[in-house]
């Protein structure tokens, strides 16, 4: 049995260390579903840490990632397998939070075993899909620097990738919320889960666009070669900052795509009953912050520079949180904010000379 102190350490202290800004979203969720979401995030983060431990070779990472996934596909957790993962990876972590998370992986699985079979099944599904996406990522991008740059081939590949790493979370989120919040009884779960997938894809596409330079530096080009071909570019050309004007039509197209996904996320959010203030806030915040990020991406002159970190400043994060919290996630106020940010993003794209030429 997991003690209250152990549970608090896992779902508050450690979660806060490894989830960064997403902790705000998780922490505002209503009691009764918050812990399941937090634990699922810890497992997803642990899997991501396994996949990203570049101090061990790719074959070993794939081995341990599969070993980790297997724990969600059997009736009982294999403690020896979990300990083997810990022994192989803990010492190689550069981030102290990720190291602590791996050290406490057995505690995470003990807590997981205490949840209902239905909750475990939902967690099993999302971790299986997420780790399949991580495996796809490891196989698609064999290098670890710009010297071994690889790229996705088509828009379908990009769509599939955003589903695996974030879209599936929208599905999981919907089913978990509907299972635990009686007020969601009027929702068509299948329909809203599909919209939730679009929500997740929009957030992930935003992350891809803001991190283009850093990902290229690490040998990963998530911009499909088919789109680059249309403007006469190759993935390696994006390593040159001077390629940004020529790349701009592709960037603008992907920004529009992200906005369309986030529009679906907004429909999802406004469909949440007004009494579910915490749940609404948990969806409003990431959409508004994604919009603010896209606005900055659209006009960033040095987007391809790996040293540049394009994101909304902390002051903007607190402003969004304060405004929406003080107005109790009021739909009119929040929608007015989203419409304003959305218009700014679209305007920045439409005013781009390169975009008009596309």
Image: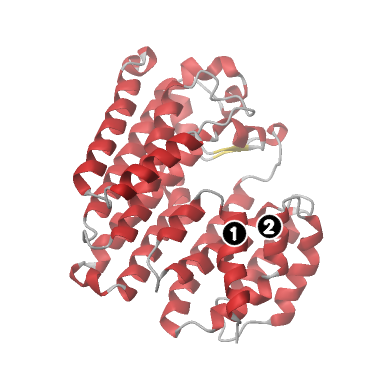
Q: State whether residue 106 appears in this view.
A: yes
Q: Is residue 254 visible?
A: no
Q: Residue visible at 76% across and 62% down?
A: 89
Residue picked out by circle 2 = 98
Residue found farthest to the front: 326
Q: Position of residue 206 (x, y in %)?
A: 44, 39
Query: Considering the numbered disc 2 on the image, is that residue within a helix, a strand or a loop?
Result: helix
The residue sitting at 49% across, 41% down in the picture is 207
Mark 2, other Cα within 10 Å: few <14 / some 14–19 / many ≥20: many
Residue position for label 1 = 45
**Do the numbered discs 1 and 2 sit on residues whose CB atoms are within 8 Å?**
yes
* The C terminus - image quarter: top left
> Residue 50: image x %, image y %?
68, 59
Viewer-nearest residue: 130 or 149: 130
Eyeballing the image, is 76 above or below 247? below
- Quadrant where the N terminus sits is bottom right
């Amino acid at each position: 049995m997991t003690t209250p102190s152990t549970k608090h350490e896992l779902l508050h202290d450690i979660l806060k260390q490894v989830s960064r800004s997403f902790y705000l979203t998780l922490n505002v969720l209503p009691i009764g579903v918050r812990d399941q979401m937090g634990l699922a995030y810890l497992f997803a983060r642990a899997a991501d840490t396994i996949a990203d431990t570049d101090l061990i070779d790719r074959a070993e990472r794939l081995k341990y990632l599969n070993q980790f996934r297997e724990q969600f596909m059997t009736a009982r957790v294999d403690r020896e397998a979990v300990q083997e993962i810990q022994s192989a990876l803990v010492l190689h972590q550069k981030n102290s939070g990720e190291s602590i998370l791996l050290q406490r992986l057995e505690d995470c699985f003990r807590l997981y075993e205490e949840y209902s079979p239905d909750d475990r099944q939902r967690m099993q599904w999302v971790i299986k899909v997420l780790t399949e996406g991580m495996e796809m990522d490891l196989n698609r991008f064999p290098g670890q620097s710009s010297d071994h740059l690889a790229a996705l081939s088509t828009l379908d590949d990009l769509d599939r990738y955003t589903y695996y790493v974030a879209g599936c979370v929208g599905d999981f989120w919907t089913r978990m919320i509907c299972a635990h919040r009686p007020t969601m009884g009027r929702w068509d779960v299948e329909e809203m889960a599909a919209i939730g997938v679009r929500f997740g894809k929009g957030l992930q596409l935003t992350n891809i666009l803001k991190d283009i330079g850093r990902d290229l530096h690490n040998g990963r080009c998530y911009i499909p070669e088919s789109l680059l071909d249309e403007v006469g570019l190759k993935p390696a050309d994006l390593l040159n900052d001077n390629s940004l004007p020529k790349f701009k039509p592709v960037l603008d197209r992907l920004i529009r795509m992200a906005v369309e996904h986030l529009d679906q996320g907004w429909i999802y959010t406004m469909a949440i009953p007004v009494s579910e203030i915490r749940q609404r806030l948990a969806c409003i915040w990431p959409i508004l912050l994604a919009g603010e990020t896209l606005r900055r991406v659209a006009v960033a002159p040095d987007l391809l520079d790996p040293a540049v970190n394009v994101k909304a400043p902390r002051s903007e994060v607190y402003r969004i949180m304060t405004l929406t919290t003080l107005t109790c996630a009021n739909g009119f106020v929040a929608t007015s904010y989203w419409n304003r940010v959305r218009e700014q993003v679209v305007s920045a794209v439409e005013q781009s000379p390169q975009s008009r030429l596309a």
